[in-house]
Amino acid sequence: MEEAKGVVKHVLLAKFKDEIPTHEIDKLIKGYANLVNLIPPMKAFHWGSDVSIENLHQGFTHVFESSFESTEDIAEYISHPAHVEFANLFLRAVDKVIVIDYKPTIVHL
């Protein structure tokens, strides 16, 4: 196995509060996506909602994945004023959240 060079993934799983309307969730997702334009170390952003048939989501409904070049870049992203401002809005709208940062590993068979 070989660790991918120059990439670190930042994954956030979220369960939005039941009372948050869909249009507000959509607005938050657009705000999250826009951080790529505001925070230089953030290289990419993807998101999706749960479509699994296994029903193992434990209430989490959305996944957000951002790409960085290093863990230092993630630290810069987390402390960036645009992220801090957005996180304050986002966290008020969620019941629960999980965040995992990882370096993708290539498996050679």
Image (cartoon, rainbow, N blue to C red):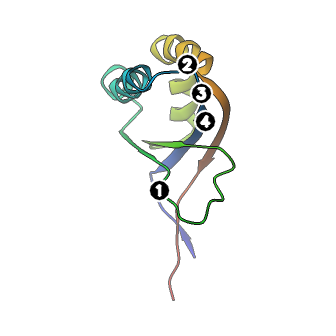
Vertical relation: 95 (above or below) 49: above
Q: Amino acid at mark 2?
A: Ala
- Of labels 4 and 2, earlier in sequence is 4
83 left or right of 17?
Answer: left
For mark 2, give the secondary structure: helix
For mark 3, give the secondary structure: loop
For mark 4, give the secondary structure: strand
Nearer to us in this view, 49 or 88:
49
Vertical relation: 97 (above or below) 21: below
Q: For marks 1 and 4, give the CA distance.
A: 14 Å
Q: Amino acid at mark 3?
A: Asp
Q: Are marks 2 and 1 in contact (CB under 8 Å)?
A: no
Nearer to us in this view, 75 or 57:
57
Residue located 41% across and 31% down the image: 41
- Mark 2 or 1: in front is 1
- Mark 4 or 3: in front is 3
Residue located 37% across and 27% down the image: 26
Task: Indicate the position of residue 86 as horizontal and vertical percent values.
Answer: 49, 16
- Mark 2 or 3: in front is 3
Q: Residue 51 bears which disc, if any?
A: 1
Q: Which residue is mark 4?
A: 15
Q: Which residue is mark 2?
A: 87
Q: Quadrant of residue 27?
A: top left
Q: For marks 4 and 3, give the CA distance.
A: 9 Å
- Of labels 2 and 3, earlier in sequence is 3
Nearer to us in this view, 101 or 31:
31
Residue located 59% across and 27% down the image: 18
